[in-house]
Amino acid sequence: MSLSNRFPLHDPDWVAQVHATQYLQSWSKQGVRPPVITGALGSWFWDSNGKRYLDFQSQLVNANMGHQHPKIVQAIKDQADRLCYIGPAMGCDVRSELAALVAEITPGNLTSTFFTTGGSAANETAIRLARHYTGRSKIVARYRSYHGATGGTLSLTGDPRHHLTRADMPGVVRMFDPYCYRCPVGHEDVSKCPVCRGGPHLEELLMYEDPNTVAAVILEPVTGTNGIIVPPDGYLVSIKETCEKYGILLIADEVMAGYGRTGKWFAVDHWGVQPDILTSAKGINSGYVPLGTMSVSSDIAQWLNKNALPGGLTYAGHPLACASGVAAIRAMEDERALENATRLGDAMRTRLRAMMDDHPSIGDVRGLGMFNGIELVRDRETRAPLVTFGAKGDAAAPMAAMMKAAMDKGLYLSFYNNIIRLTPPLNISEDDMFLGLSILGEVLEIADDETKQRN
Ligand SMILES: Cc1ncc(COP(=O)(O)O)c(C=O)c1O
Protein backbone atom coordinates (compact mmCIF):
# COMPACT_ATOMS: atom_id res chain seq x y z
CA MET A 1 0.00 0.00 0.00
CA SER A 2 1.29 3.47 -0.70
CA LEU A 3 -0.22 6.68 0.64
CA SER A 4 -1.64 9.17 -1.83
CA ASN A 5 0.87 11.78 -2.78
CA ARG A 6 -1.18 13.54 -5.39
CA PHE A 7 -3.63 15.55 -3.33
CA PRO A 8 -4.72 18.62 -5.32
CA LEU A 9 -3.48 21.09 -2.71
CA HIS A 10 -3.76 23.98 -5.12
CA ASP A 11 -7.47 23.41 -5.56
CA PRO A 12 -9.28 25.44 -2.87
CA ASP A 13 -12.44 23.44 -3.51
CA TRP A 14 -10.68 20.23 -2.53
CA VAL A 15 -9.16 21.88 0.58
CA ALA A 16 -12.57 23.19 1.71
CA GLN A 17 -14.25 19.86 1.02
CA VAL A 18 -11.73 17.84 3.03
CA HIS A 19 -11.94 20.45 5.82
CA ALA A 20 -15.70 19.94 5.92
CA THR A 21 -15.64 16.16 5.79
CA GLN A 22 -12.35 14.81 7.17
CA TYR A 23 -11.08 17.49 9.53
CA LEU A 24 -12.84 18.03 12.87
CA GLN A 25 -13.26 21.66 13.82
CA SER A 26 -13.13 22.95 17.45
CA TRP A 27 -16.40 23.61 19.32
CA SER A 28 -18.57 23.37 16.20
CA LYS A 29 -20.96 21.24 14.32
CA GLN A 30 -18.99 19.80 11.41
CA GLY A 31 -19.51 19.92 7.66
CA VAL A 32 -18.99 23.64 7.04
CA ARG A 33 -16.81 24.69 4.12
CA PRO A 34 -14.54 27.53 5.25
CA PRO A 35 -12.79 30.22 3.22
CA VAL A 36 -9.39 28.81 2.29
CA ILE A 37 -6.66 31.09 3.55
CA THR A 38 -3.54 31.24 1.46
CA GLY A 39 -1.49 33.93 3.14
CA ALA A 40 -1.24 36.61 5.80
CA LEU A 41 0.95 39.57 6.69
CA GLY A 42 0.70 42.04 9.55
CA SER A 43 -2.95 42.76 10.32
CA TRP A 44 -4.26 41.20 7.09
CA PHE A 45 -4.90 37.73 5.71
CA TRP A 46 -6.34 36.69 2.35
CA ASP A 47 -8.17 33.77 0.79
CA SER A 48 -7.80 31.69 -2.36
CA ASN A 49 -9.89 34.22 -4.31
CA GLY A 50 -7.49 36.99 -3.36
CA LYS A 51 -10.06 38.57 -1.04
CA ARG A 52 -8.36 40.38 1.85
CA TYR A 53 -9.59 40.46 5.44
CA LEU A 54 -8.55 42.88 8.17
CA ASP A 55 -7.91 40.76 11.25
CA PHE A 56 -9.76 42.60 14.04
CA GLN A 57 -9.56 39.46 16.21
CA SER A 58 -5.84 38.63 15.91
CA GLN A 59 -7.20 35.15 15.09
CA LEU A 60 -7.96 33.61 18.50
CA VAL A 61 -6.67 36.78 20.22
CA ASN A 62 -3.17 35.40 19.89
CA ALA A 63 -1.52 37.10 16.90
CA ASN A 64 -0.51 40.04 19.11
CA MET A 65 2.37 40.99 16.80
CA GLY A 66 0.33 40.30 13.68
CA HIS A 67 0.90 37.67 11.03
CA GLN A 68 4.27 36.47 9.74
CA HIS A 69 6.35 38.84 11.86
CA PRO A 70 9.76 38.47 10.18
CA LYS A 71 11.79 38.27 13.40
CA ILE A 72 9.60 35.57 14.91
CA VAL A 73 9.56 33.58 11.66
CA GLN A 74 13.35 33.86 11.38
CA ALA A 75 13.85 32.72 14.99
CA ILE A 76 11.79 29.58 14.31
CA LYS A 77 13.78 28.85 11.14
CA ASP A 78 17.11 29.38 12.89
CA GLN A 79 16.09 27.16 15.80
CA ALA A 80 14.85 24.46 13.42
CA ASP A 81 18.29 24.44 11.80
CA ARG A 82 20.05 24.19 15.19
CA LEU A 83 17.89 21.87 17.33
CA CYS A 84 14.22 21.03 16.71
CA TYR A 85 13.61 19.02 19.83
CA ILE A 86 15.32 17.97 23.01
CA GLY A 87 13.54 16.48 26.05
CA PRO A 88 12.28 18.79 28.81
CA ALA A 89 14.87 17.64 31.36
CA MET A 90 17.83 18.72 29.18
CA GLY A 91 19.40 22.14 29.32
CA CYS A 92 18.68 24.18 26.20
CA ASP A 93 19.75 27.78 25.62
CA VAL A 94 16.44 29.17 24.26
CA ARG A 95 14.49 27.37 26.98
CA SER A 96 16.58 29.05 29.70
CA GLU A 97 16.49 32.35 27.83
CA LEU A 98 12.69 32.33 27.72
CA ALA A 99 12.40 31.30 31.39
CA ALA A 100 14.70 34.19 32.37
CA LEU A 101 12.83 36.68 30.16
CA VAL A 102 9.44 35.60 31.56
CA ALA A 103 10.78 36.01 35.13
CA GLU A 104 11.89 39.54 34.18
CA ILE A 105 8.53 40.69 32.84
CA THR A 106 6.07 38.86 35.12
CA PRO A 107 5.15 40.81 38.24
CA GLY A 108 6.95 40.66 41.59
CA ASN A 109 8.39 37.40 42.74
CA LEU A 110 7.13 35.05 40.01
CA THR A 111 10.49 33.44 39.49
CA SER A 112 10.05 30.09 37.81
CA THR A 113 8.11 28.86 34.79
CA PHE A 114 6.78 25.56 33.48
CA PHE A 115 6.24 25.66 29.72
CA THR A 116 3.23 23.97 28.19
CA THR A 117 1.63 23.59 24.77
CA GLY A 118 -1.11 26.15 25.44
CA GLY A 119 -3.43 27.78 27.95
CA SER A 120 -5.48 24.71 28.90
CA ALA A 121 -2.41 22.71 29.87
CA ALA A 122 -1.03 25.69 31.81
CA ASN A 123 -4.24 26.07 33.84
CA GLU A 124 -4.63 22.33 34.33
CA THR A 125 -1.12 22.17 35.79
CA ALA A 126 -1.77 25.28 37.90
CA ILE A 127 -4.83 23.85 39.64
CA ARG A 128 -3.14 20.51 40.25
CA LEU A 129 -0.12 22.30 41.71
CA ALA A 130 -2.33 24.56 43.87
CA ARG A 131 -4.03 21.48 45.31
CA HIS A 132 -0.75 19.73 46.08
CA TYR A 133 0.88 22.83 47.51
CA THR A 134 -1.99 23.75 49.83
CA GLY A 135 -3.25 20.24 50.55
CA ARG A 136 -6.76 21.58 49.86
CA SER A 137 -9.15 20.62 47.09
CA LYS A 138 -11.68 23.33 46.17
CA ILE A 139 -11.08 25.92 43.46
CA VAL A 140 -13.15 29.10 43.16
CA ALA A 141 -13.85 30.17 39.57
CA ARG A 142 -16.25 32.66 37.98
CA TYR A 143 -19.26 32.25 35.70
CA ARG A 144 -18.13 34.51 32.89
CA SER A 145 -14.90 32.69 32.28
CA TYR A 146 -13.08 30.39 29.90
CA HIS A 147 -10.09 28.48 31.26
CA GLY A 148 -9.60 25.73 28.69
CA ALA A 149 -10.83 22.56 27.07
CA THR A 150 -9.24 19.86 29.25
CA GLY A 151 -11.26 18.03 31.93
CA GLY A 152 -10.29 20.24 34.85
CA THR A 153 -10.13 23.55 33.03
CA LEU A 154 -13.45 23.05 31.26
CA SER A 155 -15.02 22.30 34.64
CA LEU A 156 -13.63 25.60 35.96
CA THR A 157 -14.93 27.39 32.89
CA GLY A 158 -18.23 29.13 33.56
CA ASP A 159 -19.03 29.68 29.87
CA PRO A 160 -21.88 27.30 28.84
CA ARG A 161 -19.34 25.07 27.10
CA HIS A 162 -18.65 23.59 30.54
CA HIS A 163 -22.03 21.83 30.29
CA LEU A 164 -20.28 19.52 27.81
CA THR A 165 -17.97 18.08 30.47
CA ARG A 166 -20.71 15.78 31.82
CA ALA A 167 -18.41 14.34 34.51
CA ASP A 168 -17.46 17.67 36.08
CA MET A 169 -14.31 17.86 38.15
CA PRO A 170 -15.40 17.94 41.80
CA GLY A 171 -14.52 20.87 44.02
CA VAL A 172 -15.39 23.80 41.74
CA VAL A 173 -17.06 26.68 43.61
CA ARG A 174 -18.62 29.33 41.40
CA MET A 175 -18.29 33.07 42.07
CA PHE A 176 -20.14 35.95 40.35
CA ASP A 177 -18.29 38.43 38.13
CA PRO A 178 -17.70 42.17 38.55
CA TYR A 179 -19.82 42.77 35.46
CA CYS A 180 -20.91 46.25 36.43
CA TYR A 181 -22.88 47.01 33.23
CA ARG A 182 -25.23 44.19 34.25
CA CYS A 183 -24.40 43.76 37.90
CA PRO A 184 -25.23 40.13 38.81
CA VAL A 185 -26.75 41.25 42.11
CA GLY A 186 -28.39 44.38 40.76
CA HIS A 187 -26.32 47.08 42.50
CA GLU A 188 -25.99 50.37 40.65
CA ASP A 189 -23.32 51.69 43.00
CA VAL A 190 -20.06 49.75 42.66
CA SER A 191 -18.79 51.05 45.99
CA LYS A 192 -21.65 49.30 47.76
CA CYS A 193 -21.69 46.10 45.68
CA PRO A 194 -20.14 43.05 47.36
CA VAL A 195 -19.60 41.32 44.01
CA CYS A 196 -18.04 44.24 42.15
CA ARG A 197 -15.79 45.05 45.12
CA GLY A 198 -14.60 41.43 45.07
CA GLY A 199 -13.48 40.59 48.60
CA PRO A 200 -16.89 40.73 50.34
CA HIS A 201 -18.50 38.32 47.86
CA LEU A 202 -15.55 35.93 48.05
CA GLU A 203 -15.56 36.15 51.82
CA GLU A 204 -19.23 35.16 51.92
CA LEU A 205 -18.58 32.10 49.71
CA LEU A 206 -15.68 31.10 51.91
CA MET A 207 -17.87 31.34 55.00
CA TYR A 208 -20.15 28.67 53.52
CA GLU A 209 -17.42 26.55 51.94
CA ASP A 210 -14.86 26.62 54.79
CA PRO A 211 -11.76 28.49 53.66
CA ASN A 212 -9.51 25.68 54.90
CA THR A 213 -10.82 23.52 52.05
CA VAL A 214 -10.12 26.08 49.30
CA ALA A 215 -6.82 25.79 47.42
CA ALA A 216 -7.12 28.64 44.93
CA VAL A 217 -9.14 31.30 43.23
CA ILE A 218 -8.65 31.32 39.45
CA LEU A 219 -9.76 34.28 37.38
CA GLU A 220 -9.09 36.19 34.20
CA PRO A 221 -7.94 39.62 35.49
CA VAL A 222 -9.76 41.09 32.48
CA THR A 223 -12.37 38.66 31.18
CA GLY A 224 -11.82 37.86 27.51
CA THR A 225 -14.02 35.41 25.64
CA ASN A 226 -16.99 35.94 27.93
CA GLY A 227 -17.42 39.61 27.24
CA ILE A 228 -14.35 41.83 27.79
CA ILE A 229 -15.10 42.70 31.41
CA VAL A 230 -12.65 45.08 33.07
CA PRO A 231 -13.03 44.92 36.87
CA PRO A 232 -13.48 48.15 38.79
CA ASP A 233 -10.37 49.55 40.50
CA GLY A 234 -9.85 47.85 43.83
CA TYR A 235 -11.48 44.56 42.80
CA LEU A 236 -8.36 42.49 42.23
CA VAL A 237 -6.56 43.97 45.24
CA SER A 238 -9.55 43.05 47.40
CA ILE A 239 -9.66 39.48 46.02
CA LYS A 240 -5.93 39.09 46.62
CA GLU A 241 -6.20 40.39 50.20
CA THR A 242 -9.01 37.95 50.93
CA CYS A 243 -6.99 35.08 49.45
CA GLU A 244 -3.99 36.00 51.59
CA LYS A 245 -6.12 36.18 54.72
CA TYR A 246 -7.07 32.51 54.30
CA GLY A 247 -3.89 31.07 52.75
CA ILE A 248 -5.63 30.64 49.38
CA LEU A 249 -3.57 30.96 46.18
CA LEU A 250 -4.54 33.44 43.48
CA ILE A 251 -4.13 32.08 39.95
CA ALA A 252 -4.23 34.82 37.30
CA ASP A 253 -5.25 33.32 33.96
CA GLU A 254 -3.55 35.76 31.58
CA VAL A 255 -3.83 33.47 28.59
CA MET A 256 -5.77 36.10 26.65
CA ALA A 257 -5.10 39.28 28.63
CA GLY A 258 -1.34 38.83 28.93
CA TYR A 259 1.55 39.84 26.73
CA GLY A 260 0.59 43.41 26.03
CA ARG A 261 -3.05 42.89 25.11
CA THR A 262 -4.18 45.40 27.76
CA GLY A 263 -1.25 47.79 27.18
CA LYS A 264 0.90 46.30 29.95
CA TRP A 265 2.79 43.02 29.95
CA PHE A 266 0.05 41.56 32.14
CA ALA A 267 -3.41 42.78 33.08
CA VAL A 268 -2.66 42.41 36.82
CA ASP A 269 0.01 45.12 36.36
CA HIS A 270 -2.77 47.70 36.02
CA TRP A 271 -3.60 47.21 39.69
CA GLY A 272 -0.20 46.16 41.07
CA VAL A 273 -1.49 42.74 42.06
CA GLN A 274 0.94 39.87 42.48
CA PRO A 275 -0.70 36.49 41.85
CA ASP A 276 0.84 33.31 43.29
CA ILE A 277 0.57 31.60 39.92
CA LEU A 278 0.24 33.27 36.52
CA THR A 279 -0.64 31.36 33.38
CA SER A 280 -0.23 32.58 29.82
CA ALA A 281 -0.16 31.36 26.20
CA LYS A 282 -1.43 32.97 22.98
CA GLY A 283 0.30 36.39 22.77
CA ILE A 284 3.57 35.14 24.28
CA ASN A 285 4.70 34.18 20.76
CA SER A 286 1.74 35.42 18.71
CA GLY A 287 0.64 31.80 18.34
CA TYR A 288 3.24 30.83 15.75
CA VAL A 289 4.12 27.61 17.62
CA PRO A 290 1.96 26.11 20.42
CA LEU A 291 3.21 27.53 23.76
CA GLY A 292 1.85 28.26 27.22
CA THR A 293 3.36 29.08 30.59
CA MET A 294 2.69 28.57 34.27
CA SER A 295 4.86 30.87 36.38
CA VAL A 296 5.01 30.47 40.15
CA SER A 297 6.06 32.60 43.11
CA SER A 298 9.41 32.08 44.81
CA ASP A 299 7.63 30.40 47.76
CA ILE A 300 6.09 27.80 45.47
CA ALA A 301 9.34 27.47 43.51
CA GLN A 302 11.21 26.70 46.74
CA TRP A 303 8.57 24.15 47.72
CA LEU A 304 9.10 22.54 44.33
CA ASN A 305 12.76 22.04 45.20
CA LYS A 306 11.59 19.45 47.72
CA ASN A 307 8.35 18.27 46.09
CA ALA A 308 7.94 17.08 42.52
CA LEU A 309 6.02 19.21 40.05
CA PRO A 310 2.70 17.41 39.62
CA GLY A 311 2.59 17.61 35.84
CA GLY A 312 4.63 17.14 32.69
CA LEU A 313 4.43 17.17 28.92
CA THR A 314 6.53 15.66 26.14
CA TYR A 315 6.63 19.11 24.59
CA ALA A 316 7.30 21.16 27.75
CA GLY A 317 9.82 23.80 26.76
CA HIS A 318 9.81 22.84 23.09
CA PRO A 319 12.81 24.60 21.52
CA LEU A 320 10.86 25.90 18.49
CA ALA A 321 8.20 27.35 20.81
CA CYS A 322 10.78 28.86 23.17
CA ALA A 323 12.71 30.43 20.28
CA SER A 324 9.53 32.01 18.96
CA GLY A 325 8.65 33.26 22.46
CA VAL A 326 12.02 34.93 22.93
CA ALA A 327 11.79 36.58 19.50
CA ALA A 328 8.22 37.76 20.09
CA ILE A 329 8.98 39.30 23.49
CA ARG A 330 12.06 41.06 22.11
CA ALA A 331 10.05 42.33 19.11
CA MET A 332 7.32 43.62 21.44
CA GLU A 333 9.90 45.54 23.40
CA ASP A 334 11.82 46.86 20.36
CA GLU A 335 8.66 47.92 18.56
CA ARG A 336 7.01 49.44 21.63
CA ALA A 337 3.97 47.20 21.22
CA LEU A 338 2.64 47.96 24.72
CA GLU A 339 2.73 51.71 24.15
CA ASN A 340 1.03 51.25 20.79
CA ALA A 341 -1.69 49.11 22.34
CA THR A 342 -2.34 51.77 24.99
CA ARG A 343 -2.39 54.68 22.53
CA LEU A 344 -4.45 53.01 19.81
CA GLY A 345 -6.70 51.27 22.33
CA ASP A 346 -7.59 54.64 23.86
CA ALA A 347 -8.23 56.05 20.37
CA MET A 348 -10.40 53.05 19.54
CA ARG A 349 -12.64 53.48 22.58
CA THR A 350 -12.89 57.24 21.97
CA ARG A 351 -14.07 56.59 18.40
CA LEU A 352 -16.48 53.86 19.53
CA ARG A 353 -18.01 56.21 22.10
CA ALA A 354 -18.43 58.84 19.39
CA MET A 355 -20.11 56.20 17.21
CA MET A 356 -22.79 55.80 19.87
CA ASP A 357 -24.38 59.03 18.52
CA ASP A 358 -25.13 57.34 15.20
CA HIS A 359 -25.60 53.79 16.42
CA PRO A 360 -28.36 53.34 19.02
CA SER A 361 -27.50 49.64 19.24
CA ILE A 362 -24.24 50.32 21.08
CA GLY A 363 -25.12 50.03 24.77
CA ASP A 364 -21.66 49.89 26.27
CA VAL A 365 -18.08 50.46 25.14
CA ARG A 366 -15.42 48.95 27.35
CA GLY A 367 -11.88 47.63 27.42
CA LEU A 368 -8.28 48.21 28.26
CA GLY A 369 -5.50 48.68 25.70
CA MET A 370 -6.26 46.58 22.62
CA PHE A 371 -8.72 44.41 24.53
CA ASN A 372 -12.03 46.04 23.68
CA GLY A 373 -15.66 45.23 23.18
CA ILE A 374 -19.06 46.72 22.53
CA GLU A 375 -22.25 45.39 23.99
CA LEU A 376 -25.29 45.66 21.72
CA VAL A 377 -28.76 46.45 23.04
CA ARG A 378 -32.30 46.90 21.74
CA ASP A 379 -32.86 49.82 24.07
CA ARG A 380 -30.05 51.83 25.61
CA GLU A 381 -32.13 52.89 28.60
CA THR A 382 -33.34 49.45 29.70
CA ARG A 383 -30.16 47.77 28.42
CA ALA A 384 -32.28 45.00 26.91
CA PRO A 385 -29.68 42.90 25.05
CA LEU A 386 -29.85 42.70 21.26
CA VAL A 387 -29.84 38.91 21.58
CA THR A 388 -30.19 37.03 24.85
CA PHE A 389 -27.40 35.07 26.54
CA GLY A 390 -26.94 31.71 24.80
CA ALA A 391 -29.30 32.63 21.93
CA LYS A 392 -29.13 30.29 18.93
CA GLY A 393 -30.76 30.08 15.49
CA ASP A 394 -33.43 32.72 14.78
CA ALA A 395 -32.96 34.24 18.23
CA ALA A 396 -29.36 35.08 17.34
CA ALA A 397 -30.14 36.18 13.76
CA PRO A 398 -28.96 39.82 13.98
CA MET A 399 -25.55 38.76 15.29
CA ALA A 400 -25.21 36.06 12.60
CA ALA A 401 -26.19 38.61 9.94
CA MET A 402 -23.54 41.03 11.22
CA MET A 403 -20.89 38.32 11.25
CA LYS A 404 -21.67 37.53 7.62
CA ALA A 405 -21.79 41.20 6.60
CA ALA A 406 -18.42 41.84 8.26
CA MET A 407 -16.79 38.93 6.42
CA ASP A 408 -18.35 40.07 3.13
CA LYS A 409 -16.85 43.50 3.71
CA GLY A 410 -13.44 42.04 4.58
CA LEU A 411 -13.49 42.57 8.34
CA TYR A 412 -12.76 39.60 10.59
CA LEU A 413 -14.65 40.24 13.83
CA SER A 414 -15.37 38.20 16.91
CA PHE A 415 -18.90 37.76 18.28
CA TYR A 416 -20.14 36.45 21.62
CA ASN A 417 -23.86 36.59 22.47
CA ASN A 418 -24.67 40.32 22.17
CA ILE A 419 -21.03 41.41 22.35
CA ILE A 420 -18.55 42.20 19.59
CA ARG A 421 -14.92 41.84 20.65
CA LEU A 422 -12.37 44.14 19.03
CA THR A 423 -8.87 42.79 19.51
CA PRO A 424 -6.65 43.61 16.53
CA PRO A 425 -2.89 43.05 16.61
CA LEU A 426 -1.08 45.40 19.01
CA ASN A 427 1.00 46.71 16.11
CA ILE A 428 -1.90 47.49 13.77
CA SER A 429 -1.47 50.79 11.94
CA GLU A 430 -3.68 53.71 12.91
CA ASP A 431 -5.13 53.82 9.38
CA ASP A 432 -6.08 50.14 9.47
CA MET A 433 -7.64 50.48 12.89
CA PHE A 434 -9.86 53.36 11.78
CA LEU A 435 -10.67 51.53 8.54
CA GLY A 436 -11.87 48.58 10.63
CA LEU A 437 -14.01 50.84 12.79
CA SER A 438 -15.59 52.45 9.77
CA ILE A 439 -16.53 49.02 8.34
CA LEU A 440 -17.85 48.12 11.79
CA GLY A 441 -20.09 51.20 11.57
CA GLU A 442 -21.59 49.87 8.31
CA VAL A 443 -22.13 46.44 9.87
CA LEU A 444 -23.83 47.96 12.93
CA GLU A 445 -26.66 49.26 10.71
CA ILE A 446 -28.08 45.74 10.99
CA ALA A 447 -28.22 45.98 14.79
CA ASP A 448 -29.46 49.58 14.71
CA ASP A 449 -32.48 48.48 12.69
CA GLU A 450 -33.46 46.20 15.56
CA THR A 451 -33.40 48.91 18.22
CA LYS A 452 -36.25 50.81 19.76
CA GLN A 453 -34.71 54.16 18.85
CA ARG A 454 -34.85 53.26 15.15
CA ASN A 455 -38.43 51.98 15.24
C1 LIG B 1 -8.45 33.01 29.40
C2 LIG B 1 -8.15 31.73 28.69
N1 LIG B 1 -7.66 30.69 29.37
C3 LIG B 1 -7.35 29.52 28.78
C4 LIG B 1 -7.56 29.33 27.44
C5 LIG B 1 -7.24 28.00 26.80
O1 LIG B 1 -6.09 28.14 26.05
P1 LIG B 1 -5.73 27.08 24.88
O2 LIG B 1 -6.82 27.15 23.88
O3 LIG B 1 -4.39 27.56 24.38
O4 LIG B 1 -5.61 25.75 25.52
C6 LIG B 1 -8.09 30.38 26.68
C7 LIG B 1 -8.35 30.20 25.23
O5 LIG B 1 -9.03 30.96 24.61
C8 LIG B 1 -8.40 31.60 27.32
O6 LIG B 1 -8.91 32.64 26.65
Image (cartoon, grey):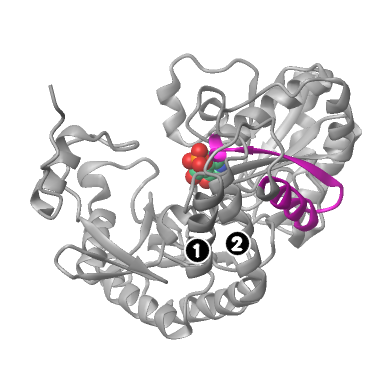
Q: Nearer the viewer, residue 162 or 297?
A: 297
Q: Is residue 41 visible?
A: yes
Q: Nearer the viewer, residue 204 or 246?
A: 246
Circle nearer the viewer, 1 or 2 = 1
Q: Quadrant of residue 209?
A: top right
Q: Residue at x 63, y 25 (%)?
A: 312
User: How far, Cα to Cα, is label 1 from label 2?
Assistant: 9 Å
Q: Position of residue 82 (x, y in %)?
A: 55, 50
Q: Position of residue 342 (x, y in %)?
A: 63, 74
Judge: label 1 CB < 8 Å from ligand 1. Answer: no
Q: Residue at x 83, y 27 (%)?
A: 304
| Horizontal side, residue 353 vs residue 334: left or right | left
Q: Quadrant of the N terminus?
A: top left
| Horizontal side, residue 170 vs residue 36: left or right | right
Residue position for label 2: 327
Give yes or no for contact between labels 1 and 2 (Cβ–Cβ under 8 Å): yes
Q: Look at label 2 and name its amino acid.
A: Ala
Depicted 414 relative to depicted 110: above or below = below
| Horizontal side, residue 233 vs residue 37: left or right | right
Residue position for label 1: 74
Judge: label 2 CB < 8 Å from ligand 1. Answer: no
Q: Is residue 451 visible?
A: no
Q: Quadrant of residue 455?
A: bottom left
Depicted 158 relative to depicted 139: above or below = below
Secondary element at tag 1: helix
Q: Look at label 1 and name its amino acid.
A: Gln
Q: Residue at x 33, y 71 (%)?
A: 453
Secondary element at tag 2: helix
Q: Is residue 107 found inside the magenta-colored segment of the image?
A: yes
Q: Position of residue 288 (x, y in %)?
A: 47, 53
Which residues are drawn in magenta?
95-120
